[in-house]
C-alpha cells in the first residue's frame, strides 16, 4: 500500500469516527463514548496530515498546537456548567475565524500564480461565513457572559442597515472574484465581521441557544469551504457534518421555541411585541403570591404519589443537581414516583439539563422529554419547578402578542399542585411576567435553589 493510499484510508477511518461520534452524542448514555471517538478521529486526521504533506513552518505549528492544548484542556475541565454555552460560543467563533484565516492566507499565497475559479468561490464563501461566525460568536459570548446586556440592542432602520451591509458583502465578493485582489478580500472580510456583530446584537437571551446553533453550522460550512481550498477531503467531510448537524439542530430548536426556520434565518430574533392585554415585563411583582415554608412543602411532597421535577437554569446556577437527586432519592424511599421533565431549550443550550443531571447520576429513564412527559402532568400530584420560568409559562399558549407565544411548553399548570423554587419574582430570559405564579394552586419557596432543596430534603425525611 502506497503512502497516499494509506493516508486516504486513515482519512476515511477518521470520517467514520466523526459520524459515529455524532450518533453517540444523541444519547446521554453514549455521549462520553461519542465525544472520545470524535477526539480520537481528529487525532488520526492531524497525524495523517503531517505524514502526507511537506509541512512548512513546523516550529510555529507545534507552538500553536501547544498553545491550543494549554488553553483548551483547562478551559474544558474547569468551566462551570452554567458557563458552558459561552464556552461553546467562544470555541465556535475561534473555529470560524481560523477557517477564514486559512482561506485568506492560501488565497494571498497563490494570487500571483492564479487561482482556479472554483477555488476563488470557495475562498469568498469561506471568508464571509467564517468571519460572520467569528464576530457573531464573540457577541454571543459577551451577552451570555453578561459583559454586555443580554437584551436585544435595536435601533430605527436596523433591518434596512443590515440588508445594505449584506448587499455590500455580496458586491465585494463579486469584486474579489473579478479582480483576485487580496486587499479587496481583506475589505470583504472586514465588512463580514461587521455584519456578524450587527446580526447578533438584536438577539435577546431567550433566542441565544438558537443563535449559537446557527453560528455553529456557519463554522462547519466555513471549514468545508477551507477543505475545497486546501483540496483536503477530510475537512470537507468534517465541515459538512458540522454544518448539516448544526442546521438540523437549529431547525429543531426553532420548532421547540415556536419559531420557524425561516423566522430564524431572516432576522426576527429578539423582536418583542407588546401584549394586547398590557402585560409587561414583570409588572406583577406587587400582586400577592402564595408562599410556604420548606417544612410545609416537604410534607406535601412526602405524601404525594407522583412528583415531576422540572429543572431550569436556576438549578444550574446554584449547582444544585446533586441536591435535587438527594431529594428525589428521599421521596423514592417513601414510595413517591419521580420523573424529570426536560424541555428542549431548558437552560441555555440543548441538552444542558440532561448533562447537568447526568453529573448527579440521575437515572436516564427518569429523564422525560417534553412530548413524553406532558400527558403525565394531569395525573401528577406535585410539579416541582426548580429555576425554570419561560419554558413553563402559560403565556406561550394563551397570550397572543407575547414574545414567547407559540413556544411549546411543559404543562406544569395542569398538575394538581405546583411548587416553584425561585430567588425572586424576576422574570426569565424573555423578560415577561409568569401568570402561573398567581394561580391559587401554586406555591413559591424563595431562596437559593440549593439551599431550598437541602431544606426540602430534611423536611421530607422528617415527614
Image (cartoon, rainbow, N blue to C red):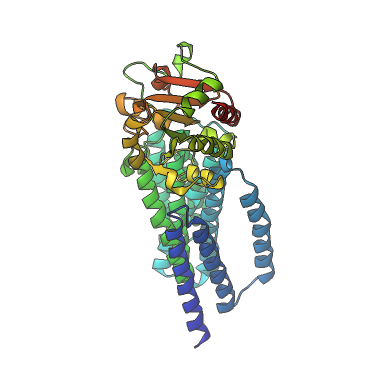
Residue 33 location, x and y as percent? Answer: 51, 61
Q: What is the quadrant of residue 70 in the picture?
A: bottom right
Relative side of 409 to 224, left or right: left
Question: Can you give x and y, in whole percent of width and height, for residue 425 in the image?
Answer: 50, 20
Residue at screen point 39% across, 19% down: 441
Q: Is residue 252 above or below residue 451?
A: below
> Looking at the picture, does residue 241 appear above or below residue 169?
below
Q: Is residue 400 visible?
A: no
Tell me where residue 66 appears, x and y as whole percent: 68, 62
Picture coordinates of residue 410, whole percent (x, y): 37, 34
Please identify the residue farthest to the bottom as the structure is shown.
Answer: 1
62 lies left or right of 178: right
On-image quarter of the C terminus:
top right
Judge by depth and name the residue closer to the eye, 175 or 278.
278
| Residue lying at 53% horizontally and 70% vertically, measured from the top left | 45
Residue positioned 62% across, 46% down in the render: 79
- Residue at horizontal 67 percent and vertical 52 percent from the top: 74
Amino acid at each position: 500500500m502506497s503512502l497516499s493510499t494509506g493516508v486516504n484510508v486513515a482519512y476515511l477511518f477518521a470520517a467514520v469516527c466523526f459520524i459515529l461520534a455524532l450518533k453517540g452524542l444523541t444519547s446521554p448514555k453514549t455521549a462520553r463514548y461519542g465525544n472520545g471517538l470524535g477526539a480520537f478521529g481528529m487525532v488520526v486526521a492531524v497525524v495523517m496530515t503531517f505524514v502526507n504533506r511537506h509541512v512548512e513552518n513546523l516550529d510555529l505549528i507545534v507552538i500553536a498546537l501547544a498553545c491550543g492544548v494549554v488553553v483548551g484542556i483547562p478551559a474544558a475541565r474547569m468551566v462551570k456548567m452554567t458557563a458552558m454555552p459561552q464556552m461553546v460560543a467562544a470555541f465556535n467563533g475561534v473555529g470560524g475565524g481560523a477557517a477564514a484565516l486559512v482561506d485568506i492566507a492560501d488565497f494571498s499565497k497563490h494570487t500571483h500564480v492564479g487561482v482556479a475559479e472554483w477555488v476563488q468561490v470557495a475562498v469568498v464563501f469561506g471568508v464571509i461565513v467564517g468571519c460572520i461566525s467569528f464576530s457573531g460568536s464573540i457577541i454571543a459570548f459577551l451577552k451570555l457572559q453578561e459583559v454586555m446586556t443580554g437584551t436585544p440592542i435595536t435601533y430605527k432602520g436596523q433591518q434596512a442597515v443590515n440588508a445594505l451591509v449584506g448587499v455590500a458583502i455580496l458586491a465585494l465578493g463579486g469584486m474579489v472574484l473579478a479582480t483576485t485582489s487580496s486587499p479587496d478580500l481583506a475589505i470583504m472580510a472586514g465588512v463580514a465581521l461587521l455584519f456578524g456583530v450587527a446580526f447578533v446584537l438584536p438577539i435577546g437571551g431567550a433566542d441565544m441557544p438558537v443563535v449559537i446553533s446557527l453560528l455553529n453550522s456557519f463554522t462547519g460550512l466555513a471549514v468545508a469551504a477551507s477543505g475545497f481550498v486546501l483540496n483536503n477531503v477530510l475537512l470537507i467531510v468534517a465541515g459538512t457534518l458540522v454544518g448539516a448537524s448544526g442546521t438540523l439542530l437549529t431547525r429543531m430548536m426553532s420548532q421547540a421555541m415556536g419559531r420557524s426556520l425561516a423566522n430564524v434565518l431572516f432576522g426576527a430574533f429578539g423582536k418583542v411585541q407588546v401584549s394586547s392585554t398590557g402585560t409587561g415585563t414583570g409588572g406583577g411583582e406587587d400582586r400577592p403570591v402564595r408562599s410556604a415554608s420548606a417544612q410545609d412543602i416537604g410534607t406535601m411532597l412526602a405524601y404525594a404519589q407522583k412528583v415531576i421535577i422540572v429543572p431550569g437554569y436556576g438549578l444550574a446556577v446554584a449547582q444544585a443537581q446533586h441536591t435535587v437527586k438527594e431529594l428525589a432519592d428521599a421521596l423514592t424511599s417513601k414510595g413517591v414516583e419521580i420523573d424529570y421533565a426536560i424541555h428542549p431549550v431548558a437552560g441555555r443550550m440543548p441538552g444542558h439539563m440532561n448533562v447537568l443531571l447526568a453529573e448527579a447520576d440521575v437515572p436516564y429513564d427518569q429523564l422525560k422529554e417534553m412530548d413524553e412527559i406532558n400527558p403525565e402532568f394531569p395525573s401528577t400530584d406535585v410539579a416541582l419547578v426548580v429555576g425554570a420560568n419561560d419554558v413553563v409559562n402559560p403565556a406561550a399558549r394563551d397570550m397572543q402578542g407575547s414574545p414567547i407565544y407559540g413556544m411549546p411548553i411543559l404543562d406544569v399548570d395542569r398538575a394538581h399542585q405546583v411548587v416553584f423554587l425561585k430567588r425572586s419574582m424576576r422574570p426569565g430570559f424573555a423578560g415577561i411576567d409568569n401568570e402561573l405564579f398567581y394561580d391559587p394552586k401554586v406555591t413559591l419557596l424563595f431562596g437559593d435553589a440549593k439551599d431550598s432543596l437541602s431544606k426540602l430534603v430534611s423536611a421530607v425525611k422528617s415527614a
